[in-house]
Every structure is written in structure tokens, then in C-alpha cells.
Image: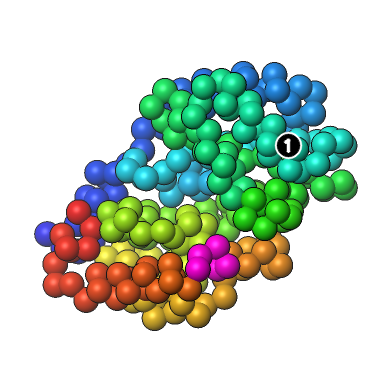
Amino acid sequence: MTGDQYVEGILQKYSVNSASAKIAADNVAPAIRRWAGNQLATLQYSGSFAKGTANNISTDIDLFISLKSDTSETLKVIYDGVFELARGQGWAPVRQNVSIGTSVSGKKLDLVPGKIQAGYQNVHSLYKRKTGFWTQTNVKAQIDTVVNSGRVKEIRAIKAWRTLHKLTFPSFYLELSVINALKGRSASNLAGNVLHALNSIGDNLPTARIVDPANTNNVISDDLTPSEKSAVARQAKTSAGKSYWKEIIW
């Protein structure tokens, strides 16, 4: 079996069941729509499901709650409101950085509330719990960056590696790191690209500055501490040096 065949087999092993994800999303959508009322602009997939980078061993289902720009509540009130909604519905909510983690019908869903910035269609303001301030993002631009990168398979493989090795490496940070590492490389060498990305992460993650392509003031690489970056980088170099694929991802 070639390296490409092995990695393709791993991607097949961890492929997602889109139907079950839709059922989970449909279970929460009515309550969210009632809570938001006429201030809801759209309710849509974001994150890994929207980008095609989801695996069945790690990926939460991200639902982006887009509220209209004339919504009067502050971003923190909106964020807290989604948490209270989830608690009232029995969804076992957990406060995360810009999202509320929930568990519904055995599926993990991250609810991400945002408010459209006046004069824009896709630019949103989000409450950032870690800082207590707001951040700007464009979910559509983030999705397009990953979908159009041509690196979805490599990203999925690295995400499986992250989960199997129990590493803290936020998904968008990981996705951008892989895309940057593989610039200019052929898409026809899947296994070689995965190893190259691991080596690049091992060499560069502790010092590389990664920014949100939709907002250069949003420094994605600040989402990990130096020690967390070092742990990811160490494992990436160790994995890239292994002799057998089964020691890297399995």
C-alpha cells in the first residue's frame, strides 16, 4: 500500500455522516429562531462542515447565528443570551471563546452568535470571551479561503492527527497553517504533502504569525499559548520522523 492509499483510507475511515449532522442542527434551529425572532438574519453552518474539513472523530457542528445590524443588545448580552437559551433547553452549554458549546442528541454543536456590521452583508462582530472585547470576522471569507485552497484532504488528515495525539490546535489556526505550509506544492502528492505540513508545523508554529484573511487585526496565532504551540510543534516533528504511517495517523 502506498502512502497516498493509506492516507486516503484514513480519510474514508473518518468521513462524516452529513445526514446525522443535519438532524442535530434541525433539533436546535427552532429554539434559536424563536429566541432571535425578527432580529435573525441567517442561521447557517460555519466551521469544518461548511469548509468540507470535518472528521467524525473530532468535529463539532458549528452553527453561525447571524443577527441583524440594528440589533440593540451588546455582543456580550447576545453571547450570554445564547448560553441561557442553551441552558434552558437542556443542551449542557459550555462557554468557549466566541461560541457556546452544546450537546444535543449525542452530537456536539458550537453555537456562534454574531452581529452584522452596519453597511455590510458578511462582516460580523463577535464577542470574544478570552479578552472581554469584540472581534471582527467574515465567515464567508474564512470558508472560501479553505474551500478554494485545494488542501481539504491534507487538512482533514492533519485534523485526524491532532485528535489522535490529543493536541490543542484550533481548527482555523490549523487550516491556515496547513495552507501556508503547502503553498506552491502539487496537489497530487497527498502523503508527501501531509508529511511536509507536519514538518512545517514543527519548524514554524512556535514563531509564525497567522492572521485571519478576513481581518488582519485578528491574529489567529494568539489563540494558543507558547507552551501549547511548543507541544504541537514537538509532536509534529516527532510524527514526521516516524518510519510507518500507522505511527502517525491510524
The residue at 42%/55% (across/down) is 152
Name the foreground residue: 46 vs 87: 87
Q: Amino acid at mark 1?
A: Ile
Whether residue 18 appears in this view of the structure is: yes
Is 35 drawn above or below residue 245 in the view shown? above
Q: Secondary structure at mark 1?
A: helix
Asked if residue 98 is among those painted magenta in the image, a careful observer would answer no
Q: Is 4 displayed left or right of 154 in the figure?
A: left
Q: Is 15 displayed left or right of 85 in the figure?
A: left
Mark 1, Cα crowd under 10 Å, few <14 / some 14-19 / many 20+, is: many
The residue at 57%/26% (across/down) is 87
Q: Is 194 displayed left or right of 206 in the figure?
A: left
The quadrant of the image that shows the N terminus is: bottom left
The magenta span reads: 221-225
Name the foreground residue: 227 vs 185: 227
Whether residue 138 appears in this view of the structure is: no
The residue at 23%/58% (across/down) is 249
The residue at 51%/26% (across/down) is 91
> Is most of the magenta stretch helix, strand or loop?
helix
Residue bearing mark 1: 78
x and y, in percent, of residue 27 in the image: 52, 20
x and y, in percent, of residue 205 in the image: 45, 75
Kindly indicate the quadrant of the structure image that contains residue 58: top left
The quadrant of the image that shows the C terminus is: bottom left
Q: How many marks?
A: 1
Kindly indicate the quadrant of the structure image that contains residue 204: bottom left
Q: Is 151 displayed left or right of 208 in the figure?
A: left
x and y, in percent, of residue 17 in the image: 36, 33
x and y, in percent, of residue 241 in the image: 21, 76
Is 79 drawn above or below residue 250 in the view shown? above
